Amino acid sequence: MEKLRVKYPVIVEGRYDKAKLATLMEGDIIQTDGFRIFSDPKKLGMIQRLAEKGAVVILTDSDRAGFRIRGHIAGAVPPERVIHVYIPEILGKERRKAKPSAEGTLGVEGMEAEVLREALRKAGVLEGEAPPEREAITKGDLYRLGFSGGEGSRGLREALVERLGLPRGVSANALPGVLTRLVSREELEALAAEIKAQASKQALS
């Protein structure tokens, strides 16, 4: 299968993640060497310089460690220069490992190639494929639709994240930018109605 051509540098955690991505994409792949990024100012500085020239893509595991690394990098560059790509939370173990991770979920290296391909496509980071022109989804939209700031909003937000195949660790602050790349405002409103209807039905049963 022809490799994907990615427009921006992709930041991953380790060499096995990098090796997996290299089998399905063309473009720059930068590894953080896990938590070493916290004590490697030169590596972080390189990422900051790349972000000055254009966007950078962050693709870490969907566990606590992955979100810590993602947050550290995202906090060091302008938010408009960060494109978050997430993998779903899938239970399992990578073949090379003797036992599952602490949270029992697969990382980037353990994802099926098509899952990674689809995540990159949806994020609009492929050469020749511009992301759809959409009106930005805001924190105000999330509040208006009941996904933040109100009673039961956390449960509704978790249901939305699950429906879209996103990991539970996506923060309320990061969610608007992610949603803007995945759904239109009209699609989000329809999802909100469906999720609320399902929640009401479950409450009555």
Image (tube, rainbow, N blue to C red):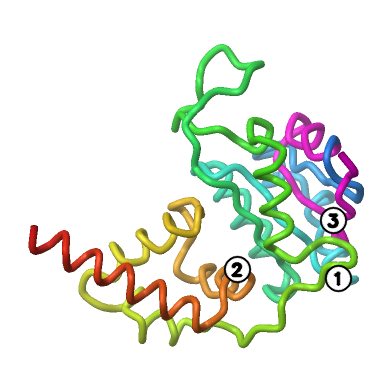
What is the C-alpha distance between the residues marked 2 and 1?
Answer: 21 Å
Residue 192 higher or lower than 91, as above or below: below
First reached walking from the N terminus: tag 2 or tag 1 = 1
Expressed as whole percent of the image width and height from the top left, the position of residue 107 reads 60, 35
Which residue, given by chain and number where applicable, does mark 1 sit on?
Answer: 54
What is the C-alpha distance between the residues marked 1 and 3?
Answer: 9 Å
First reached walking from the N terminus: tag 1 or tag 3 = 3
Q: Quadrant of the C terminus?
A: bottom left
Expressed as whole percent of the image width and height from the top left, the position of residue 162 reads 42, 55
Q: Looking at this view, is 55 or 111 the one in front?
A: 111
Circle 3 packing at 10 Å, graded few (<14), some (14-19), many (20+), is some
- Taking 84 as reference, is 199 left or right? left
Q: Looking at this view, is 165 or 84 the one in front?
A: 165
Q: Which residues are magenta?
A: 1-22
Kind of residue at disc 3? Pro
Which residue, given by chain and number where applicable, does mark 3 sit on?
Answer: 9
